[in-house]
Amino acid sequence: MSRFMYPTDELAVTYPQNLWAYYRVVVYPDGKIDDQLKRDFYIELCRLEHWSTRQLRERINSQLYERTAISKKPEETIRQEITTLKDEGRVSVDLTFRDPYLLDFLGLADTYSERDLESAILAELQRFLIEFGSDFAFLARQKRITIDHRDYAIDLLFYHRRLRCLVAIDLKIGEFEAAHKGRMELYLRYLEKYELVDGENPPIGLILCAGKNEEHIELLQLDQSNIRVAEYLTVFPPREVLQAKLHRAIELARERFN
């Protein structure tokens, strides 16, 4: 019998007055969540980030679990990382980053520039951080760095408290291209050399683009460079379309582990 068939100790500690409301959302979010790992994921993140029942329901409806990188890993890996989160309160990179990111709240027109995207994110920073996760802290916009007398600008710079690292975000209005990797690697090595403080982990790069090709990502071995690539959606698609897209992405990712 699933250990979440009855109210859990985790939610009882965090939400002693409203446990039943949370329990009903987890077990009956427009239809029962039958997958044990998915239930564990929502329970632990809800406890960690102190979601309201409305936020919990929104995250389930937006397919948050399927959008995290962890969902594309083998089940044993997922189980181990959720157990680590529960027992030690320690999050992994795969639990933190998502793909795609839903930025429909930015209200962008059909055509927009990278600067328009950046400005919209800053104007809606609070909602942007909610989509990214509660542990992200904003540090800088268009952070200027100089390398060999040449000036560069990191679009957005964040810090993640639990990962204890800087997160550099490069915004692209088109599809991911191989050349984007070199620019992000340059940013990360600069941050590692000049911005790292004692106790911090190496920085992570996120290239946020309007589209990507999975084989490019695989061949470039971006994980080895601490770089993530994710799509963003400025219009929330029909739930069934998003669900089908994410399930297909999970299937393709897990095929690579077999």
Image: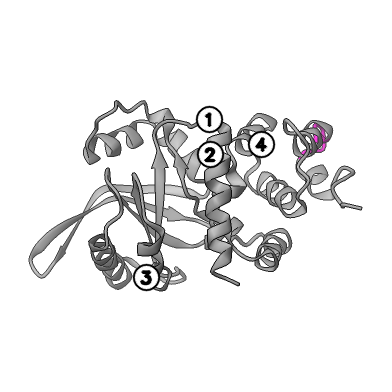
Query: Where is residue 4 drawn, in percent x and y?
Result: 84, 47
Q: Which residues are magenta?
A: 15-19
Give the secondary structure at mark 2.
Answer: helix
- Closest to the observer: 68 or 85? 68
> How many other residues sit within 10 Å of disc 3, few (<14), some (14-19) or many (≥20)?
few
The answer to whether residue 62 is above or below residue 231 is above
Q: Residue at x 58, y 34 (%)?
A: 240
Report the residue marked by disc 1. 238
- Identify residue type, mark 4: Leu
Q: Is residue 227 visible?
A: no
Asked where in the image residue 82 lies, by quadrant, the reply is bottom right
Q: In x, y percent, where is residue 201?
A: 45, 69
**Visible residue check, residue 24:** yes
Residue type at mark 3 is Leu
Q: Magenta stretch containing residue 51, yes or no?
A: no
Which of the numbered marks, if any, corresponds to residue 89?
A: none
Which badge, 4 or 1, is on the more N-terminal residue?
4
User: Where does residue 5 sit, x and y in percent of width and height?
Assistant: 88, 45
Lower position in the chain sequence, tag 3 or tag 1: 3
Residues under numbered marks 2 and 1 in contact, where contact means CB atoms less than 8 Å apart: yes
Q: Which mark is residue 219?
A: 3
Q: Disc 4 vs disc 1: Cβ atoms closer than 8 Å? A: no
Q: Disc 2 marks which residue?
A: 242
Q: Earlier in the sequence, mark 3 or mark 4?
A: 4
Residue 171, compared with residue 214, is above or below; it is above
Q: Are marks 3 and 2 in contact (CB under 8 Å)?
A: no
Q: Determine the CA span between mark 2 and mark 1.
A: 6 Å
Q: CA distance from mark 4 to mark 2?
A: 18 Å
